[in-house]
């Protein structure tokens, strides 16, 4: 972690991490190893990619990076493929101020996604497909790996801090992350095609241990606390 984990100040910070996850399910961190210009560079390349592939896809052509035979676990996932599980009872239980905009019956998401593996997989892992690299982006692998590894490094520190704050072994989580499905999974949405009020991604919960987002250029992402408060 870079500091003496036995110091009181570090213990206090770790306790705060554990409490934040328990109470809110979200934690906002600033990692000095991750530079804002790197985040901007990553968003730039993704905006350029989604814009170019949208033109091809909407013209009715198949995308070279689209891999349904790999269950969309690598490469691009166009809009209309992903959809949330039904959460009708939970959505109805919220009051008006905290209710999701999602319809009670899930509809296919209007967002696109690209899945890029970060780190090594365990041998024989069922999702260990070859990486998909767009041929017209020569610096794709370098930029995706650079930002993906910065995010993973931040998650690893947060996982260690959460473990310390919970009073368990520091590596209780991180040792179980080794060889796992670490994915850089940027999303893109066509704001020319989809107007104000469109639900780009339905109300859902993530299936992974932790999800990390870099700083976005647009608002619109919401989370719900254990007290059913929309943030």
Image (cartoon, grey):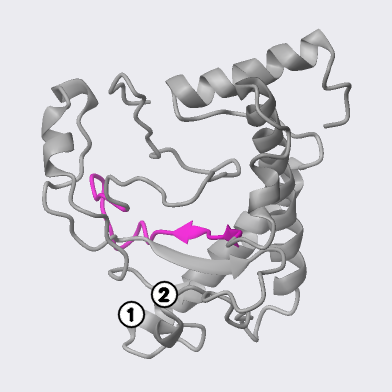
Q: Which label number is shown at residue 20? A: none
* Most foreground residue, 226 or 203: 226
Choose top left, top right, bottom left or bottom right for residue 159: top right
The residue indicated by pointer 2 is 54
Q: Which residues are magenta?
A: 182-200
* Most foreground residue, 18 or 142: 18
The residue indicated by pointer 1 is 58
Q: Which element type, helix, strand or loop, lies under badge 1? A: helix
The quadrant in which the C terminus is found is top left
**Magenta span: chief secondary structure:** loop
Q: In the image, 153: left or right of 228?
A: right
Asked if labels 2 and 1 touch by Cβ distance under 8 angstroms, the answer is: yes
Q: Is residue 52 above or below residue 166?
A: below
Picture coordinates of residue 181, whole percent (x, y): 58, 62
In magenta segment, residue 190: yes
At label 2, counting other C-alpha atoms closer than 10 Å, the crowd grade (few under 14, some 14-19, many 20 or more) is some
Q: In the image, 214: left or right of 30?
A: left
Q: CA distance from mark 1 to mark 2?
A: 6 Å
In magenta segment, residue 70: no
Q: In the image, 28: left or right of 5?
A: left
Q: Which element type, helix, strand or loop, lies under badge 2? A: helix
Q: Residue at x 28, y 23 (%)?
A: 228
Picture coordinates of residue 22, whole percent (x, y): 47, 23
Q: Residue at x 39, y 59 (%)?
A: 189
């Amino acid at each position: 972690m870079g500091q003496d984990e036995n110091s009181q100040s570090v213990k206090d910070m770790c306790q705060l991490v554990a409490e934040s996850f328990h109470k809110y399910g979200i934690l906002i961190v600033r990692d000095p190893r991750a530079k804002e210009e790197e985040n901007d560079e990553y968003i730039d390349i993704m905006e350029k990619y989604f814009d170019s592939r949208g033109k091809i896809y909407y013209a009715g052509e198949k995308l070279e990076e689209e891999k349904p035979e790999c269950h969309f676990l690598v490469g691009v996932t166009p809009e209309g493929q992903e959809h949330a599980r039904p959460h009708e009872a939970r959505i109805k239980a919220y009051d008006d101020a905290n209710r999701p905009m999602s319809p009670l019956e899930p509809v296919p998401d209007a967002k696109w996604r690209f899945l890029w593996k970060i780190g090594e997989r365990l041998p024989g892992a069922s999702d260990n497909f070859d990486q998909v690299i767009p041929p017209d982006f020569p610096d794709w692998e370098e930029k995706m790996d650079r930002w993906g590894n910065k995010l993973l490094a931040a998650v690893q520190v947060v996982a260690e801090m959460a473990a310390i704050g919970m009073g368990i072994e520091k590596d209780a989580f991180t040792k179980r992350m080794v060889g796992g499905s670490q994915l850089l999974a940027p999303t893109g949405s066509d704001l020319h095609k989809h107007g104000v009020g469109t639900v780009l991604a339905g109300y859902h919960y993530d299936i992974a241990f932790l999800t990390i987002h870099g700083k976005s250029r647009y608002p619109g992402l919401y989370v719900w606390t254990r007290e059913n408060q929309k943030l």
